[in-house]
Amino acid sequence: MKITELEINGVYLIENINFSDNRGIFVKVFSDDLFRRNKINFSPKEIYYSISHKNVIRGMHFQIPPFEHSKLIFVLMGKVMDVILDIRRNSPTFGKSISVYLEENKDSIYIPIGCAHGFRSLEDNTLVVYNQTSCYSKEHDKGILWNSFGFDWGIKSPIISERDQSFVAFVNFNSPF
């Protein structure tokens, strides 16, 4: 596995170990030893997955203290454009967003506390796995409006939940991070 820090402090692209032969494939997506050597403290408390149609946008999600969490995201089937927005007020990259493409059985992305996360599904039946370091708390589960922070999603008519469309615009967001 190879870990590379991206343009937002604490966001890492992880090149997963991938073996294939006549039986199929075997993928390693997490190594506690490797994460610790790279000063990434990650201990998952809940694991979820979503299956999305093509052109679904999910995001931009996070949880506020005291139920904040970091995430490790990977794709088991399909392909996504994964988007991370830094919402840490004292971060030099506050308000900056980046995107990476994740496809099945390839790379993972580590997202630290204080970053909002979302993605656009690029294929039908895209299966995304979320590993999180805290348990879900409805009253602490928040979001930023997907089209309010200057990111070009590359789509005119995405499929978005009512909940995700109701999030506060970034300009009106008062970050607790």
Image: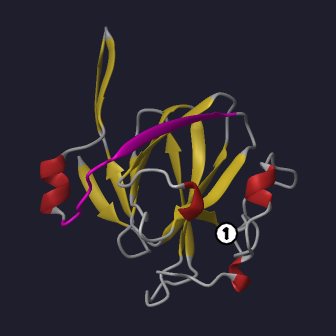
Residue 78 at x, y percent in the picture? 58, 32
Q: Name the quadrant containing residue 42.
A: bottom left
Which sits in the foreground, 60 or 122?
Answer: 60
Residue 135 left/right relative to 173: left
Q: Residue furthest front?
A: 139
Q: Which residue is mark 1?
A: 144
Q: Residue at x 81, y 45 (%)?
A: 159
Q: In the rendered view, would you say 134 is above or below 172? A: above
Image quadrant where residue 12 sits: bottom left
**The disc labelled 1 sits on which kind of residue?**
Ile
In the current view of this chain or complex, which residue is farthest to the top?
A: 23
Whether 54 is among the magenta residues is: no
Mark 1 closeness class: few <14, some 14–19, many ≥20 residues within 10 Å: many
Q: Does residue 20 appear left or right of residue 161 in this picture? A: left
Residue 15: x, y in percent?
32, 47
Q: Residue at x 73, y 44 (%)?
A: 56
Residue 10 x, y percent position in the rendering? 35, 71
**Range covered by the magenta-colored residues:** 39-52
